[in-house]
Image (cartoon, grey):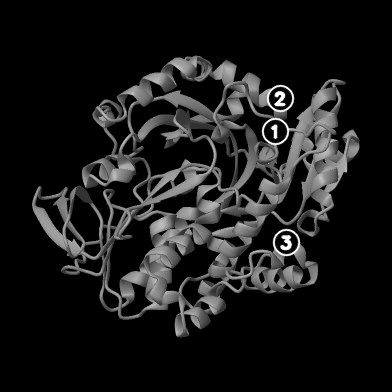
Amino acid sequence: MKHATHIENPDVILIGSGIMSANLGAMLKRLEPNLSVQVYEVTEELAQESSHGWNNAGTGHAGICELSYTPTREADGTVNVAKAIGIFEQFEQTKQFWSYAVASGMVGNPREFINPIAHISFVHGPEQVDFLKARHAGMSAHHFFREMAYTTDRATIGAWAPLLVEGRGDVPIAATKMDGGTDVNFGVIARQLLAWLARQPGCGIASNHRVVDLKKTAEGWDVSIRDLATGEIRRSRAKFVFVGAGGGSLHLLQKSGIAESKGLGGFPIGGQWLVCDHPEIVNKHQAKVYGQALDAAPTMAVPHLDTRVLDGRKTLLFGPFAAWTTKFLHRKGSWTDLPGSIKPDNLATLLKIGASNLPLVRYLIQQGTQSMADRVAVLHIFYPAARAEDWKLIDAGIRVQAIKKTDGEAGIVHYGTEVITNPDRSISALLGASPGASVCVPIVLDVIKLCFPQLVTGAGQTQLKEMIPTHDVDTKLTQNAGYFHEIQRRTNQRLQLD
């Protein structure tokens, strides 16, 4: 459904209707009801790019099963689990705000956007089995992960996820499992929050509108927007702009001219999934199973076999498989996006990335030339008995890996989600990839604290505490098991995850 409500010269313009803009807009309006907010979205429907259900794995990233968040062992053989603990805590804060949204009537039935599902890590081969044992020792020592189970017993793994052992040879295998994981449809929760925002006074949403220019003024930003249906250019002014346009963020940052955009580049990677809808297979698998990273693959390409709940129906998804592309957006991108992003200030950075990441380039070429048989061969690592005829290949979203200079060296941002804000705090833009959507609430809360500090003091602080109880007690969830379980129990109850 096309949205076409315009607020003249609002306080805030949000570019993009994905999970980040949706949470930021809803939180701002809840903290300051008099704030005027306008959302512009390039597609006709909302949350159709990275947040769309088929364009991501839907994993509520909590560090439970993702081996890429605990990638290496220390010299003494232990595994550093600090990153997993941090991601778990951030996702809990995201759940807290969503549970508040449910309790306050901002959104509807939580089962439409979040469902409980076991999270499993699965490895094969003696070295990886030993690694997973050490990882489990580090994870289960923390109260976040105390219920995590570990086994090398095939019968137990078969009870957890039968497809993992069907037809498998005698190579050593191991798995960990926690029942506290989730499957999330980020597109649905984004659309529900935006629907609430659209009903509030002083708020508008216009889809099928592309922001084409940003110019800094003394009062804020002059924003030029093209109506894609008519070609008409509309101009608006705003005190604050948030660029949450996924792959489109880089171009808009470059148009803004802010110093923080200089030298930034983007490397787009397309995605594909194998999907199975056969009920007799789907019903055997009730988990999200993450495995070992593939050589030279970016963080987001760690393979996994997932139960998905989309539009009320369960399906199985395996991947992702990477694909070469020069587009920055899946639905509204152009093959000229990558060449058009190359500027004098980032050319040297991009050339250095290309020269120093030849394994990644080879990986993308190999991925793009795979046959269906090649992809099913990768699936056999998880599901040895899989038959090609039971699976279909679909295109998924595009992720633009941010490229920037760190300590004078060019590098691809494989991990993390970064917000760039200019010195006068009138514009913020989102870059990065995993864990992304799962930690949307802590990310946009940081934007609010930095750019709208007046909203988080006094009465605003009380309101924020109701929305996200642990936002101001960074160490309490990690150090106090009793407090953590108390807050999590209430959150899960509201979200029907208990």
**Could you give the CA–CA distance between mark 1 and mark 2, rounded to whole angstroms?**
9 Å
Q: Looking at the rendered structure, which numbered label has been put on residue 478?
A: 3
Q: Nearer the viewer, residue 380 or 408?
A: 408
Mark closest to the chain's N terminus, 1 or 2: 1
**Identity, as a three-letter code, of the amino acid under mark 3:** Thr
From the viewer's perspective, is 303 left or right of 352? right
Quarter of the picture holding the N terminus: bottom left
**Could you give the CA–CA distance between mark 2 and mark 3, rounded to whole angstroms?**
35 Å
- Percent across and percent down for residue 170 are 87, 21
- Read off the residue under disc 1: 291
Which label sits in the foreground, 2 or 3? 3
Element on which disc 1 rests: loop
Q: Which of 104 and 356 is in front in this view?
A: 356
Element on which disc 3 rests: helix
Which label sits in the foreground, 1 or 2? 1
Q: How crowded is mark 3: few (under 14 residues within 10 Å), some or many (20 or more)?
A: some
Q: In this view, does 323 lie above or below 468?
A: above
Mark closest to the chain's N terminus, 2 or 3: 2
Quarter of the image where one finds residue 385: top right
**Identity, as a three-letter code, of the amino acid under mark 2:** Ile
- Percent across and percent down for residue 273 are 53, 33
- Percent across and percent down for residue 224 are 15, 53
Residues at badges 1 and 2 in contact (C-beta under 8 Å)?
Answer: yes
